[in-house]
């Protein structure tokens, strides 16, 4: 007997769903002899890559984790007292294990389908309530990408709402975090807004060209100011004022809302989220009720379901980019749901008393440190402070000596200059202990040649020596949810109760078109919670982050290979931010060529709403290109408009394969046309899962594209974030990639688009792991399998649902659009199908995008044939249910589709009066009977919730009705 040793545990076989036997059956159903034949019939020959991807050989999971441990081990874990918006903290283990490390939470999708997302919607309501009460404002969103982005969004909101004609200046305190100023300046420039950076104490607010102001609380150097008079003066001069604040400090400090601020922004990282070398973290945004219709980002609100029970859902969606496109309040699509859930749960677990105690202890240690350093003869500059001291030094030489000694002791401070003299900043945190304070004092004592041999302890009493106007009097975290889950047992059960309400990839496939809900392998996720990944401050010296440097360098090189581009920036922390950064690179390129007048962006009518929204943010004029009846770009219309705007053409934004799920044969001609008229081509990378290893953005003729690492490269969606949207560019656009004011990012001088130099650095290891374990051949095989799975579904479903678009040979790419518009004749809406799928245990495909009344289906490569067949069975049975209505066998209004989804409470009634059986309602298939997922609520009434907007925790039953009626938004994919 001859044995054949070979690798027994190949990761690509774990990642891709169909095995060899299943592939054979699927090809037979499609009507092709081989997978090669299917790919040849699907992907145009003119754009096919001529060589295999040059990537390192695939590793097994065990080999990868061993290798990555060595890489991560190069990072040095110093004690970090740098501050500037990032602080060591402690994520309670019960939250880490049961949310951050739990696929029931991190593999869920943005909660468009509210009935199967009530758990995280409640968690987000908790987060919004926490933010509203701590900031003293009336409404908050469910998170933004980071503090800098939130501040940039407030600039945009204030500019859109100012009543001062021709106002084009925005005041920013020089004490705002430097990275925030950088991001805000990046946002302001294309909009023609001038930043006025200065001292808020001497600012002239009577300037008629000013429309708003941004302050920092506490300030970047740690000083605490009472902004009440500044805000009053600003209001008297018709300025709107935002305050960037520290949530932990607000447990002791008077909240900005009580000072009169119109908005408050910041970062909730201190509430339990590791620094992660910069992210991801949940930025927050709170404002006055008067701005609720223009606040950026997602808002979670309370409504009722069909049975009149309380239910949550995303509110006021008509503000968002997938509805309003270039007129949207923001291009924000992906938020930071998983991170905001973590921060909200931190507040739930600790409650107001413990959160306040963290703040009290932090401030007490800061007082103790100030006393000891002053006793050494050092000058502490801040009259009032919370956690951060600023020391004025005699010379830069002394500053250098302190730095050398501190780093030798494994300690990082902030080193900067202010008013022409050297400074050291020391920001303490809720992890600080008495021994840490003593270690800090020893560093200074040694440099100053003085002895220090005290044993320090947490003071038993500490006087809060702030003016009364700065001392918080109002209560916060008052809702029962923040006051009843303080034992680990209660907290564990609460989180599990919420998790059980949500459908995730742990339950079934999530076939959302343009969203690529593929496997997030456990081995890819494991390093995320390693201290060597989570414990680094983003502004720590680069030599302490050699592991991260290797991760960045390798990942950038690999993504260049995949895209065919010359350079990549990892800074954008969402797909929409990647779009924005790519458009800024094009804009800056044209300006450098003396062509600042080139500001027209051609965008196909089928594009995702972030495209036109991002273009407007980049200062461009949007011109829409028509689509043909078969769903392709109307090439003649594009050529006509490229010629018409030849003198002002900046770029074309194009998705490839198209948003209609087709590899358009004319793509090379399209790109050449734009180039011939002096424009550049921006490729939206939303559908990159259908390109990797088969074609590339550079091959089709694109100049820049963003990549959704949370789609193609396996970072989980997290229930609506985090996402990562790096951009790749051709060589002549490389100088215009995002830079950073605090950390030199390869010498790039362009403005930052994210607060941290490498964006959401701590989740980049997920994509690093995916590429490492797949290798070039595995990545290509994943793309081929994604195309196989999509065409298998098409073959199985097209006899029941018309498939709107296909390529020249009748094939779809990695997704397809099922046309449900004909069912309207029988009174059945596409929403009814989406809700009915919940009874079968499925999340709906993408609803009404890019074509109203349709379902866009993307199975990804990770789903097995068995799961695909189960989805087919559900869709076919639903078609039969529709046919019963069409033929008059079921009532047009009182039927199983119109009442979907069915909850346990719905069917467990004594008197069942509906014209279909309870079994048909909740057990439509054998699988549903065996593995039932129960929706937590019946169909949610979104319009009711928008008329009666409640965005915080409440038990109120009766709401004051407001007259405005908003239509329910179509559901677009999350970038």
Image (spheres, rainbow, N blue to C red):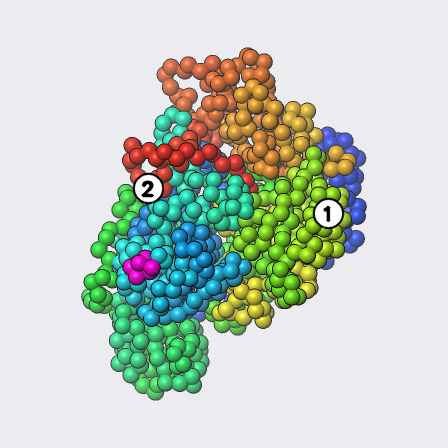
Taking the view exactly as shown, the residue that stands out farthest to the bottom is 449
Answer above or below: position of 546 versus 777. below
Q: Is there any visible trace of residue 353 in the rendered image?
A: yes
Identify the mark at residue 953; answer none if there is no mark. 2
Q: In which quarter of the image is residue 859?
A: top right
Residue 639 shows which numbered tag? 1
Residue at x 58%, y 59% (from the top left corner): 584
Residue reaching furthest top?
A: 889
Q: How many labels does the image show?
A: 2
**Residue 519 visible to the viewer:** no
The residue carrying pointer 1 sits among few (fewer than 14), some (14 to 19) or many (20 or more) residues within 10 Å by Cα, namely some
674 is higher (above) or lower (below) than 883 = below
Q: Nearer the viewer, mark 1 or mark 2?
A: 1
Q: What stretch is highlighted in magenta?
A: 231-237
Q: Is residue 300 above or below residue 88?
A: above
Say left or right for 947 vs 719: left
Q: Name the N-terminal-most of marks 1 and 2.
A: 1
Residue 954: horizontal and vertical position, in percent?
A: 30, 39
Work out which quarter of the rendered image holds the N terminus and state it: top right
Mark 2 crowd level (few <14, some 14–19, many ≥20, 10 Å Cα)? many
Residue at 61% from the left image edge and 24% from the top image edge: 822
Can you tell which mark lies on residue 27? none
Identified at 30% across, 73% down, the residue is 382
Element class at badge 2: loop
Residue 120, percent across and down?
42, 42
């Amino acid at each position: 007997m001859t044995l054949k040793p070979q690798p027994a545990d190949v990761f690509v076989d774990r990642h891709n769903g169909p095995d060899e036997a299943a592939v054979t059956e699927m090809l037979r159903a499609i009507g092709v002899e081989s997978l090669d034949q299917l790919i040849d019939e699907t992907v145009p020959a003119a754009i096919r890559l001529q060589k295999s991807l040059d990537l390192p050989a695939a590793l097994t999971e065990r080999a990868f984790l061993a290798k990555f441990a060595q890489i991560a081990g190069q990072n040095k874990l110093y004690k970090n007292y740098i501050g500037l918006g990032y602080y060591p903290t402690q994520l309670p283990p019960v939250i880490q294990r049961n949310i951050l490390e739990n696929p029931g939470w991190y593999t869920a999708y943005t909660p468009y389908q509210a009935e199967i997302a009530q758990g995280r919607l409640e968690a987000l309501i908790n987060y919004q309530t926490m933010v509203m009460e701590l900031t003293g404002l009336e409404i908050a969103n469910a998170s933004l990408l980071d503090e800098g982005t939130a501040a940039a969004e407030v600039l945009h909101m204030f500019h859109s709402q100012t009543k001062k004609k021709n106002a084009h200046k925005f005041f920013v305190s020089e004490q705002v975090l430097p990275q925030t100023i950088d991001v805000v300046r990046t946002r302001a420039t294309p909009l023609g807004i001038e930043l006025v950076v200065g001292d808020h104490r001497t600012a002239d607010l009577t300037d008629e060209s000013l429309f708003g102001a941004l302050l920092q609380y506490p300030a970047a150097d740690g000083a605490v100011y009472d902004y009440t008079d500044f805000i009053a003066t600003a209001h008297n001069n018709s300025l709107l004022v935002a305050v960037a604040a520290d949530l932990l400090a607000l447990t002791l400090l008077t909240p900005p809302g009580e000072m009169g601020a119109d908005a408050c922004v910041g970062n909730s990282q201190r509430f339990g989220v590791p620094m992660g070398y910069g992210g991801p973290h949940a930025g927050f945004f709170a404002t006055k009720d008067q701005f609720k219709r223009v606040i950026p980002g997602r808002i979670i609100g309370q409504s009722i379901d069909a049975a009149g029970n309380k239910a949550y859902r995303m509110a006021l969606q008509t503000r968002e980019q997938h509805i309003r496109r270039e007129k949207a309040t923001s291009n924000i699509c992906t938020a930071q749901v998983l991170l905001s859930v973590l921060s909200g749960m931190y507040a739930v677990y600790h409650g107001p008393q413990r959160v306040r105690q963290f703040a009290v202890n932090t401030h007490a240690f800061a007082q103790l440190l100030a006393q000891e350093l002053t006793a050494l003869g050092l000058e502490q500059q801040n009259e009032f402070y919370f956690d951060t001291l600023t020391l004025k030094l005699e010379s830069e030489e002394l500053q250098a000596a302190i730095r050398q000694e501190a780093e030798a002791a494994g300690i990082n401070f902030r080193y900067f200059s202010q008013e022409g003299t050297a400074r050291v900043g020391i920001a303490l945190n809720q992890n600080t202990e008495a021994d840490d304070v003593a270690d800090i004092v020893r560093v200074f004592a040694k440099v100053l040649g003085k002895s220090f041999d005290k044993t320090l302890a947490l003071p038993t009493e500490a006087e809060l020596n702030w003016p009364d106007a700065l001392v918080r009097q109002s209560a916060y975290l008052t809702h029962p949810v923040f006051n009843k889950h303080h034992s680990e047992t209660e907290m564990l059960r609460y989180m599990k109760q919420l998790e059980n309400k949500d459908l995730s990839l742990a339950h079934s496939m999530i076939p959302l078109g343009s969203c690529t809900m593929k496997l997030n392998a456990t081995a890819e996720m494991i390093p995320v919670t390693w201290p060597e990944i989570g414990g680094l401050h983003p502004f720590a010296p680069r030599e302490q982050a050699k592991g991260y440097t290797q991760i960045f360098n390798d990942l950038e090189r690999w993504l260049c290979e995949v895209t065919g581009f010359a350079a990549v920036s990892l800074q954008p922390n969402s797909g929409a931010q990647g779009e924005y950064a790519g458009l800024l690179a094009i804009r800056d390129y044209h300006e450098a060529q003396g062509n600042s007048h080139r500001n027209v962006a051609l965008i196909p009518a089928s594009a995702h709403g972030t495209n036109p929204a991002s273009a407007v943010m980049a200062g461009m004029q949007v011109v829409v290109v028509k689509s043909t009846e078969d769903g392709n770009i109307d090439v003649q219309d594009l050529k006509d408009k490229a010629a018409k705007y030849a003198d002002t053409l900046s770029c074309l934004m194009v998705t490839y394969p198209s948003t209609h799920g087709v590899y358009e044969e004319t793509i090379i001609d399209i790109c050449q046309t734009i180039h011939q008229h002096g424009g550049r081509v921006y490729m939206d990378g939303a559908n990159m899962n259908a390109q990797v290893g088969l074609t590339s953005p550079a091959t089709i003729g694109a100049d820049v594209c963003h990549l959704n690492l949370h789609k193609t490269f396996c970072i989980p969606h997290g229930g609506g974030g985090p996402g990562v949207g790096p951009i790749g560019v051709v060589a002549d656009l490389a100088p215009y990639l995002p830079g950073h004011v605090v950390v030199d990012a390869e010498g790039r001088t362009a403005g930052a688009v994210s607060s941290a130099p490498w964006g959401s650095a701590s989740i980049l290891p997920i994509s690093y792991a995916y590429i490492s374990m797949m290798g070039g051949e595995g990545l290509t095989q994943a793309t081929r399998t994604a195309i196989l799975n999509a065409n298998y579904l098409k073959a199985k479903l097209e006899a029941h649902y018309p498939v709107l678009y296909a390529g020249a040979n009748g094939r779809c790419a990695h997704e397809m659009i099922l046309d449900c518009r004909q069912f309207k004749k029988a009174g059945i809406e596409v929403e009814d199908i989406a809700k009915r799928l919940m009874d079968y245990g499925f999340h709906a495909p993408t609803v009404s995008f890019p074509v109203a009344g349709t379902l866009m289906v993307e199975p990804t490569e990770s789903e097995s044939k068995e799961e695909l067949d189960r989805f087919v069975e559900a869709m076919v049975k639903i078609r039969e249910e529709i046919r019963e209505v069409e033929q008059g066998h079921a009532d047009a209004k009182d039927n199983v589709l119109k009442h979907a989804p069915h909850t346990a409470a719905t069917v467990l009634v004594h008197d069942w009066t509906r014209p279909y059986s309870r079994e048909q309602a909740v057990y439509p298939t054998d699988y549903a009977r065996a593995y039932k997922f129960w929706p937590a609520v019946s169909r949610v009434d979104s319009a009711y919730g928008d008329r009666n907007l409640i965005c915080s925790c409440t038990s109120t039953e009766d709401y004051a009705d407001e007259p405005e009626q908003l239509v329910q938004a179509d559901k677009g994919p999350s970038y």
